[in-house]
């Protein structure tokens, strides 16, 4: 019985070995493989970033590709799970031999894979960088501002534009983020010479009832509160403030809450919710700044969110660098080109993008202020220009 | 501290209501229903969907959501009492863990994982005591907990239905042989607790984190509260819920203790279990 199977088994093993051998070498005329690691399932999902990057690459392929070669884009799910995130990176970098990663957006991916990318000498232009490792690795250069500069910006807007006093911070700390948020607050203090009245770094993620923290902040005399929340938490905090009748408070939040759903869920926003949007506000449908992105997203049925802006921009930057390259397109040459690239401007961002040779990539320092006022259920533009962190 | 404790009353009332439901289920149908809060979550989510996407008037959507919570609960009860009529409490309760996971997954599939635009039925402060604001939600949840516990007690001790229910929970087979309609009565208990959980979740969901997981996991502090009454006594379940909420609220006021706050329900569970088993002999307690 076993003898019948032996030839078939041998053939299968042979085919597998040949295939494995072939996987290691990239065909110079075949497709250019690009990948991304994303939170497509799990507790928090951001599928729009990689969807937007794919839409950009599909459009480029339809127009003839890059130097006659098509781009093959592999977006892998990290399930919000460290082991899956590590496996996803190895599948793209080691298995598929991707030349670079473009448009990744995940809560944990940078922290898990930063060292591996260094080891494999591959670069990643994340669509949306979230955790501190996205901004402190030589091999990862996100397209977005990131939550830390965003916090400095939101504080600057509160103190310098709205002229608010008695500002406080409620920080939701996950993992190793506390020193980075503290640094962001210190940056604001150095620029303005002002101090926060009160900082509570004990606010839990996914807390059920935020009333005790709200009561505490109110008792401390806060007139404005900056928070780094995820959407459901922020809604819980605003509702808790509403239940307490705390109306004379201004919320200085981050791009993490800048979405249509959030606006629909918040009716009572005290003196207003202010956010420095990391990209030009997508809720302004008439702006020519976002037209190209909006048209592409609408054509591909991709939600109009900050995440899809990040993924779109990451892919655009990458394409521009790729189109400017001479000679072979390999991981080595792409890495070299990104390290030596000239800054690329785009109307959707306030800071031109450059990967460059730096040991860290945290150079995007401009946001566009938007506001959500009580009773409106919609975001409004709250500025006429980019708000920038001044160079010191 | 006092301010914090009073701020925690809203959560306390919510825990108390759910703890009363858990206690009733445990006493009358021999189930620790882990899907107690998840049923309410699912009903309230459907209510929101009907109002936002279905275009129904808000009151009607809420009523339908609450009814669905009740029906869902009856359905789980029917499964348990049909196939696990003679099984032990542990086995019957294990089924509800599966239901809990199913409902969380189903809500992600149907409604995504973005926050739902819950419209608040009650918003704003009710009154102020010594500089501390007591919100409308707090008043309603605490009142509901007390009223439901009293009503349940009255029904169980003073009405024929209550007597039948108690007979059914003590000796299910004997009660059935005496002609007590076991299935219908347990379905009624499942349905009633399903309706109550959905109502309380509909009330609190707009004023707190309302993603599927947070709402479903409210069963943990509720179980800690129910444990104070040993899953038998309604008055202690209410007291347990209120004390737990107030304790969490008070702990949040002290930075150094704030971390402990999230573990309070678990600490309470462990502490109460150890205390209740203190006189047991090792072999007998196993």
Image (cartoon, coloured by chain):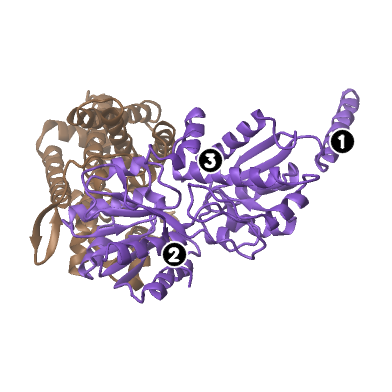
Chain colours: A purple, B brown
Nearest-to-viewer mark from 1 and 2: 2
How many residues crowd around disc 2 within 10 Å: few (fewer than 14), some, or many (20 or more)?
some
Looking at the picture, tell me which residue is in the foreground, B198 or B61.
Answer: B61
Nearest-to-viewer mark from 2 and 3: 2
The quarter of the picture where residue B18 lies is top left
Q: Is residue A188 above or below residue A93?
A: below
Looking at the picture, tell me which residue is in the foreground, A25 or A3.
Answer: A25
**Residue A223 location (% of width, % of height):** 23, 65
Counting residues from the N terminus, which is met first, the one under dot 1 or under dot 3? 1
Q: Is residue B152 above or below residue A273?
A: above
**Mark 2 = which residue?**
A389
Q: CA distance from mark 2 to mark 3?
A: 32 Å
How many residues crowd around disc 3 within 10 Å: few (fewer than 14), some, or many (20 or more)?
many
Counting residues from the N terminus, which is met first, the one under dot 2 or under dot 3? 3
Residue at point 86%, 37% (across, down): A17
Q: Which chain is mark 2 on?
A: A
Q: CA distance from mark 1 to mark 3?
A: 32 Å
**Residue A306 location (% of width, % of height):** 45, 45
Q: Which chain is mark 1 on?
A: A
Return the mark for residue A40. 3
**Residue A263 location (% of width, % of height):** 31, 43
- Residue A363 horizontal side relative to residue A16, left or right: left
Return the mark for residue A18. 1
């Amino acid at each position: 019985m076993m003898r019948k199977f032996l030839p078939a088994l041998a053939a299968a093993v042979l085919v597998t070995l040949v295939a494995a051998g072939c996987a290691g070498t990239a065909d110079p005329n075949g497709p250019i493989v690009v990948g991304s690691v994303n939170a497509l399932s799990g507790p928090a999902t951001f599928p729009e970033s990689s969807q937007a990057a794919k839409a950009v690459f599909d459009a480029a392929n339809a127009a003839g590709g890059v130097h006659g070669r098509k781009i093959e884009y592999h977006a892998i799910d990290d399930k919000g799970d460290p082991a899956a995130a590590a496996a996803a990176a190895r599948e793209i970098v080691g298995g598929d031999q991707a030349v670079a990663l473009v448009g990744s957006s995940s809560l944990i991916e940078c922290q898990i894979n930063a060292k591996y990318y260094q080891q494999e000498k591959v670069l990643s232009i994340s669509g949306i960088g979230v955790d501190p490792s996205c901004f402190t690795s030589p091999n990862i250069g996100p397209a977005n501002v990131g939550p830390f500069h965003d916090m400095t910006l939101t504080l600057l807007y509160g103190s310098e534009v709205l002229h608010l006093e008695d500002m406080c911070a409620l920080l939701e700390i996950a993992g190793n983020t506390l020193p980075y948020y503290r640094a962001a607050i210190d940056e604001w203090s150095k620029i303005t010479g002002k101090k926060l009245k009160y900082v509570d770094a004990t606010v839990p993620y996914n807390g059920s009832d935020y009333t005790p923290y709200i009561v505490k902040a109110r008792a401390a005399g806060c007139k404005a509160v900056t928070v780094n929340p995820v959407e459901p938490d922020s809604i819980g905090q605003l509702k808790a403030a509403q239940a307490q009748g705390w109306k004379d408070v201004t919320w200085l939040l981050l791009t993490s809450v800048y979405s249509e759903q959030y606006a629909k869920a918040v009716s009572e926003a005290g003196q207003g919710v202010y956010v420095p949007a990391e990209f030009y506000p997508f809720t302004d449908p008439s702006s020519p700044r976002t037209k190209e992105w909006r048209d592409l997203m609408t054509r591909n049925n991709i939600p109009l969110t900050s995440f899809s802006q990040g993924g779109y921009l990451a892919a655009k930057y990458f394409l521009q660098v790729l189109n400017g390259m001479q000679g072979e397109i390999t991981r080595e040459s792409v890495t070299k080109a990104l390290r030596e690239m000239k800054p690329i401007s785009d109307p959707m961002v306030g800071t031109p993008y450059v990967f460059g040779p730096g040991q860290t990539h945290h150079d995007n320092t401009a946001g566009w202020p938007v506001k959500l006022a009580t009773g409106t259920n919609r975001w409004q533009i709250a500025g006429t220009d980019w708000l920038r962190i001044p160079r010191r | 501290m006092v301010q914090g404790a009073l701020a925690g009353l809203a959560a306390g009332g919510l825990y108390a209501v759910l703890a009363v439901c858990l206690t009733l289920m445990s006493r009358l149908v021999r189930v620790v229903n882990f899907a107690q809060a998840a049923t309410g979550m699912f009903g309230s989510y459907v209510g929101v969907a009907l109002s936002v996407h279905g275009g129904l008037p808000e009151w009607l959507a809420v009523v339908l959501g609450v009814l669905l919570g009740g029906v869902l609960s009856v359905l789980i009860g029917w499964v348990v009492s049909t196939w696990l009529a003679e099984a032990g409490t542990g086995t019957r309760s294990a089924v509800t863990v599966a239901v809990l996971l199913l409902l969380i997954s189903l809500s992600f599939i149907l409604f995504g994982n973005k926050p739902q635009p819950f419209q608040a039925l009650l918003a704003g402060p009710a009154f102020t005591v010594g500089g501390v604001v007591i919100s409308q939600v707090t008043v309603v949840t605490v009142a509901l907990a007390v009223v439901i516990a009293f009503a349940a007690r009255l029904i169980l001790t003073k009405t024929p239905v209550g007597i039948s229910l108690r007979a059914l929970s003590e000796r299910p087979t004997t009660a059935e042989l005496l002609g007590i309609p076991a299935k219908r009565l347990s379905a009624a208990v499942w349905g009633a607790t399903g309706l109550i959980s959905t109502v309380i979740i509909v009330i609190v969901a707009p004023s707190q984190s309302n993603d599927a997981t947070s709402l479903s996991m409210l069963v943990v502090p509720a179980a800690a509260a129910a444990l104070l009454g040993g899953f038998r006594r309604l008055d202690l379940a209410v007291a347990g819920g209120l004390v737990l909420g107030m304790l969490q609220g008070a702990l949040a006021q002290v930075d150094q203790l704030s971390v402990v706050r999230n573990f309070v329900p678990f600490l309470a569970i462990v502490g109460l279990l150890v205390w209740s088993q203190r006189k047991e002999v090792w072999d007998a307690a196993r």
